[in-house]
């Protein structure tokens, strides 16, 4: 008997789309039927490779194809009203992080998604690590007192990453993964204060984003913490440390160390977090049960709010209070 497959389309065929395409290309319940990129060669080459139809205009793709699911993988500035156009057609949606650069626009998208009733996930893939799940389990009855996050990496060469108006800067665009992990493991932020500078990378053409960022915060649960990010390094380090009375939980990359009294427990991840994430999303569509999705649109919106608050703090010099968004 022939198994019906979900018909998938992609908008934005760059770096992250390649990862999703590879995973979905192997998925037994998915057929990638169409790909769209404003750069024709990206769409055409990929379409040829995977035997899909190529488009350079998302409206045309949405009009001509009958899709069950779309992966939206455009840069932060390019979302426009694509989410609304997709969900109003009843198409399920995976949106890459960050979900936008402007809270008003993102609230409008949240409303459209809720009204449409489609299943929507956002690309906070680190939540799907087995080691993160283990950390969350360990922390369930612990009182966290302090959180220390970091995202230290190299510069991203895409033309848009270097521009504040297009990427939102490193915290909004990349270290958002760690801000989200902090929200996942410790709970919501209460206040945010940021210091940012373009210190040593001003020889990069057209750059106006900071290359060093340090953010201090308080949390709803009374804990305090900070996160540092920078793209001045050749290698890539990211992680978070959560400390309480005589214990600490450290996630460094994909590895986990838990220290309690004098005991040290270490765990290495055994999963591909992108694969876990995409499989969970497809599973939710197939079953209609959304529990497998660890980051829905509202979650993506809440994490965006914290990183935009840091940018606001840098601009105004003020400590910014985080409003409580309803789930
Ligand atoms: N979850 C993750 O770990 C992860 C990893 C990398 C990137 N991302 C996110 O994915 C998004 C894209 O990043 P990337 O690295 O793939 O960028 P990229 O620049 O490599 O690719 C983006 C593609 O979108 C295309 N595009 C732009 N506007 C479009 C439009 N209106 N219609 C169709 N195509 C359009 C561009 O031509 C480009 O090919 C960013 O928001 C980024 O933060 C997430």
Image: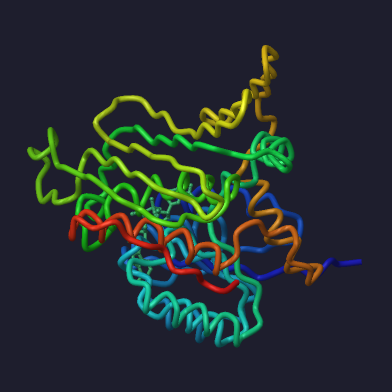
Front position in the image: 14 or 305? 305
For image coordinates 56% across by 51% down, the residue present is 221
Q: Is residue 178 left or right of residue 8?
A: left
Q: Is residue 132 above or below residue 298?
A: above
Ligand 1 quadrant? bottom left
For image coordinates 19% across by 49% down, the residue present is 209
Q: Position of residue 73 (x, y in %)?
A: 45, 61
Front position in the image: 47 or 75? 75
Q: Position of residue 75 (x, y in %)?
A: 35, 60
Front position in the image: 188 or 292? 188
Is residue 21 in view from this perspective? no
Q: Position of residue 297 (x, y in %)?
A: 55, 68
For image coordinates 66% across by 70% down, the residue present is 7
Q: Position of residue 121 (x, y in %)?
A: 59, 64
The quadrant of the image that shows the C terminus is: bottom right
Q: Is residue 55 above or below residue 270?
A: below
Is residue 147 in view from this perspective? yes
Q: Is residue 240 left or right of residue 130?
A: left
Q: Is residue 19 above or below residue 297?
A: above
Q: Is residue 201 left or right of residue 104?
A: left
């Amino acid at each position: 008997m022939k198994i019906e497959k979900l018909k998938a389309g992609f908008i934005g065929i760059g770096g992250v789309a390649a990862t999703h395409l590879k995973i979905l290309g192997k998925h037994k319940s998915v057929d990638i039927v169409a790909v769209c990129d404003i750069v024709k060669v990206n769409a055409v080459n990929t379409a040829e490779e995977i035997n899909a139809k190529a488009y350079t205009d998302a409206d045309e793709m949405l009009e001509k194809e009958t899709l069950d699911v779309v992966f939206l993988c455009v840069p932060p500035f390019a979302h426009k009203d694509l989410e609304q156009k997709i969900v109003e057609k009843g198409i399920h949606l995976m949106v890459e992080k960050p979900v936008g650069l402007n809270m008003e626009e993102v609230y409008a998208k949240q409303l459209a998604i809720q009204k449409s009733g489609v299943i929507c996930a956002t690309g906070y893939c680190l939540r799907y690590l087995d080691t993160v799940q283990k950390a969350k389990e360990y922390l369930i009855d612990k009182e966290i007192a302090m959180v220390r996050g970091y995202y230290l990496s190299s510069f991203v060469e895409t033309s848009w990453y270097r521009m504040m108006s297009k990427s939102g800067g490193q915290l909004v665009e990349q270290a958002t993964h760690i801000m989200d992990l902090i929200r996942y493991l410790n709970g919501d932020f209460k206040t945010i204060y940021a210091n940012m500078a373009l210190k040593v990378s001003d020889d990069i053409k057209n750059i106006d984003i900071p290359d060093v960022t340090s953010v201090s915060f308080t949390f709803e649960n009374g804990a305090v913490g900070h996160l540092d990010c920078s793209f001045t390094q050749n290698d890539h380090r990211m992680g978070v440390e959560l400390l309480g009375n005589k214990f600490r939980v450290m996630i460094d990359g994909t590895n986990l160390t838990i220290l309690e009294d004098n005991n040290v427990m270490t765990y290495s991840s055994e999963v591909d977090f992108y694969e876990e994430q995409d499989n969970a999303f497809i599973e939710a569509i197939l079953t209609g049960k959304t529990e497998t999705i660890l980051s829905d649109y509202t979650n993506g919106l809440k994490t965006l709010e914290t990183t935009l608050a840091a940018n606001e703090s840098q601009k105004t010099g003020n400590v910014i209070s985080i409003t409580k968004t309803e789930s």
